[in-house]
Image (cartoon, helix red, strand yellow):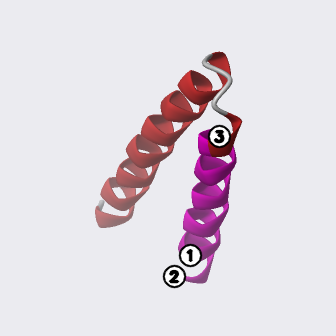
């Protein structure tokens, strides 16, 4: 059950980042979009290593 809670926490974080990424792209804030992508990559890598 604890694993499911951790996974849902990851999904919530992912959803929040994806919404911010979409907003950055829609407003043509490509620097922010690139930063968000870098954060997604780093977060995903860290979760793989845990």
Q: Are marks 1 and 2 in contact (CB under 8 Å)?
A: yes
Q: Residue at x 43, y 37 (%)?
A: 16
Q: Quadrant of the N terminus?
A: bottom left
Residue 10 x, y percent position in the rendering: 44, 54
Mark 1: which secondary structure? helix
Q: CA distance from mark 1 to mark 3?
A: 20 Å
Q: Are marks 2 and 3 in contact (CB under 8 Å)?
A: no
Q: Which residue is mark 1?
A: 46
Q: Is residue 31 above or below residue 22?
A: below
Q: CA distance from mark 1 to mark 2?
A: 6 Å
Q: Nearer the viewer, mark 1 or mark 2?
A: 1
Q: Is residue 47 above or below residue 29?
A: below
Q: Residue at x 51, y 82 (%)?
A: 50
Q: Are marks 1 and 3 in contact (CB under 8 Å)?
A: no
The verdict on residue 40 being magenta is yes
Query: Which is nearer the N-term, disc 1 or disc 3?
Result: 3
Q: CA distance from mark 2 to mark 3?
A: 26 Å
Rate crowding at label 3 as few (under 14), some (14 to 19) or many (20 or more) other CA atoms within 10 Å.
many
Q: Which residue is mark 2?
A: 50
Q: Quadrant of residue 22?
A: top right
Residue 31 x, y percent position in the rendering: 66, 44
Q: Residue at x 50, y 28 (%)?
A: 19
Residue 7 x, y percent position in the rendering: 43, 55
Q: Which residue is mark 3?
A: 33
Q: Nearer the viewer, mark 2 or mark 3?
A: 3
Query: Which is nearer the N-term, disc 2 or disc 3?
Result: 3
Q: Residue at x 59, y 42 (%)?
A: 32
The residue most toward the bottom is 49
Predominant SS of the magenta segment: helix
Residue 4 x, y percent position in the rendering: 37, 55
Give the magenta range: 32-50
């Amino acid at each position: 059950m604890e694993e499911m809670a951790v996974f849902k926490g990851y999904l919530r974080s992912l959803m929040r980042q994806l919404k911010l990424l979409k907003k950055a792209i829609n407003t043509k804030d490509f620097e922010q979009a690139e930063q968000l992508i870098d954060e997604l990559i780093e977060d995903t890598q860290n979760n793989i290593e845990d």
